[in-house]
């Protein structure tokens, strides 16, 4: 029975983290910050990323971790799992070639502000619709390869199993809210793109 409570606690921890992460990423909050603290807006994205990392560290540190192994892939078959994990990580890094990493991290916003070129209408980032590379078969390839990288694991513990499920659920929830923003921004172009391309996993 204790393990049931541990599983619930893990989902609760990740649920709170996901809720905070989504709220702070919402357009409504960004508009409020822009209105009340316009000078802070160029630093919002970088602050948001640091806060997300810090909160994730706290979650990982304090969530219950029962000493239970669900499965362990024996050698040499574990090498296949490691190979798939490395491949997923490689594709994850490959996908970053198709986004502006400095903009994603929040560094370019600060540079623009220092040059007096920051546009508050952009809120915390400039975004563009790029349909190339991995984005031709997945609208969220960063989520896709993150799921694959996290899922290919030769040793699966109780904590990691439920944490993985929670993270996958969060990716789908995050994609839902992100797509509402993209649809509002790019309109019919994004709607047509959505019809032919899978949200996270490619369409068969």
Image (cartoon, rainbow, N blue to C red):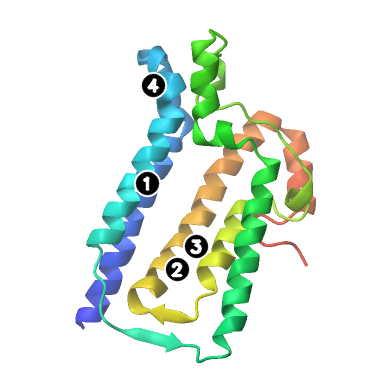
Q: Secondary structure at mark 4?
A: helix
Q: Secondary structure at mark 3?
A: helix
Looking at the image, which residue is at 43% across and 32% down? Answer: 46
Q: Check whether the beta carbons of the residues at disc 1 and disc 2 lie within 8 A of each other.
A: no
- The x and y percentages for residue 31 are 45, 22
Q: Secondary structure at mark 2?
A: helix
Q: Which disc number belongs to residue 151?
A: none
Question: Around disc 2, counting alpha carbons within 10 Å, would you say few (fewer than 14), some (14 to 19), or many (20 or more)?
Answer: some
Q: CA distance from mark 3 to mark 4?
A: 29 Å
Q: Earlier in the sequence, mark 1 or mark 4?
A: 4
Residue 191 in view, yes or no: yes
Mark 3 highlights which residue? 168
Q: CA distance from mark 4 to mark 2?
A: 32 Å
Q: Which disc number belongs to residue 53?
A: 1
**In the picture shown, does residue 25 fall above or below 196?**
above
Q: Which disc number belongs to residue 165?
A: 2
Q: Quadrant of the N terminus?
A: bottom left
Residue 200 in view, yes or no: no
Q: Check whether the beta carbons of the residues at disc 3 and disc 2 lie within 8 A of each other.
A: yes
**28 or 76: nearer the viewer:** 76
Looking at the image, which residue is at 56% across and 66% down? Answer: 149
Q: Check whether the beta carbons of the residues at disc 3 and disc 4 lie within 8 A of each other.
A: no
Mark 4 highlights which residue? 33
**In the picture shown, does residue 115 fall above or below 95?**
above
- The x and y percentages for residue 7 are 30, 73
């Amino acid at each position: 029975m204790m393990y049931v409570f541990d599983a619930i606690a893990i989902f609760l921890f990740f649920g709170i983290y996901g809720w905070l992460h989504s709220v702070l990423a919402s357009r409504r909050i960004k508009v409020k910050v822009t209105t009340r603290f316009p000078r802070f807006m160029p630093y919002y994205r970088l602050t948001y990323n640091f806060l997300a990392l810090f909160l994730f560290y706290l979650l990982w540190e304090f969530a219950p971790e029962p000493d239970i192994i669900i499965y362990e892939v024996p050698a040499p078959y574990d090498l296949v799992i490691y190979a798939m994990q490395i491949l997923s990580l490689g594709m994850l890094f490959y996908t970053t070639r198709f986004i502006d990493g400095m903009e994603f991290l929040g560094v370019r916003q600060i540079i623009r502000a220092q040059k007096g070129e920051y546009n508050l209408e952009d809120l915390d980032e400039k975004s563009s619709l790029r349909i190339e590379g991995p984005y031709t078969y997945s609208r969220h390839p960063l989520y896709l390869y993150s799921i694959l990288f996290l899922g290919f694991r030769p040793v699966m513990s109780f904590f990691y199993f439920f944490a993985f499920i929670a993270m996958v659920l969060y990716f789908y929830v995050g994609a839902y809210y992100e797509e509402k923003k993209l649809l509002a921004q790019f309109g019919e172009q994004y709607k047509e793109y959505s019809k032919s391309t899978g949200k996270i996993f490619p369409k068969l």
